[in-house]
Image: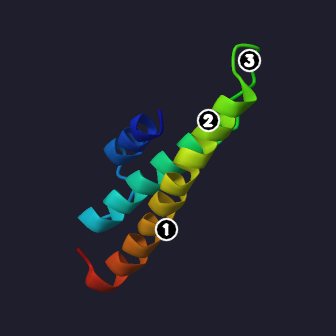
Amino acid sequence: VGWLSALVLLAFHLLGKGYLEIGSWFLMIGGLTSFLAMNFTGSTPFTSPSGVEKEMRRYMPVQALAALAAALIWVTSAFIGV
């Protein structure tokens, strides 16, 4: 869902000018939407607390790394101009 919305923003030229900046926005939007979607994990009676904890332990570091990489690439793109 996040990348689809990023594609819509890209179609309207709202994500930036360079390839690095656009790539960083894709990383950031993907990481943020997956984090927001994870807030609904365990909200049904069919999920177990141990499964929710396992999923969160596995993917929260990936989301944090995606956000950190996106921020670093975004700042770097301002200096490189690519």
Residue 37's disc number: 2
Q: Secondary structure at mark 2?
A: helix
Which residue in the structure is indicated by mark 3?
44
Q: Secondary structure at mark 1?
A: helix
Label 2 is placed on what type of residue? Ala
Badge 3: few (under 14), some or many (20 or more) residues near its Cα, within 10 Å? Answer: few
Tell me the residue at 35%/65% (across/down).
21
Q: Which mark lies nearer to you, 1 or 3?
A: 3
Tell me if label 1 and label 2 are in contact, CB under 8 Å.
Answer: no
Which residue in the structure is indicated by mark 1?
68
**Above or below, 25 relative to 55:** below
Label 1 is placed on what type of residue? Leu
The quarter holding residue 55 reads top right
Calculate the distance from the C-alpha at mark 1 to the C-alpha at mark 3. 31 Å
- Total numbered labels: 3
Calculate the distance from the C-alpha at mark 1 to the C-alpha at mark 2. 19 Å
Label 3 is placed on what type of residue? Thr
Left or right, 31 with respect to 35, comes to left
Calculate the distance from the C-alpha at mark 2 to the C-alpha at mark 3. 13 Å
Q: Position of residue 9 (x, y in %)?
A: 41, 45
Residue 67 seen:
yes
Tell me if label 2 and label 3 are in contact, CB under 8 Å.
Answer: no
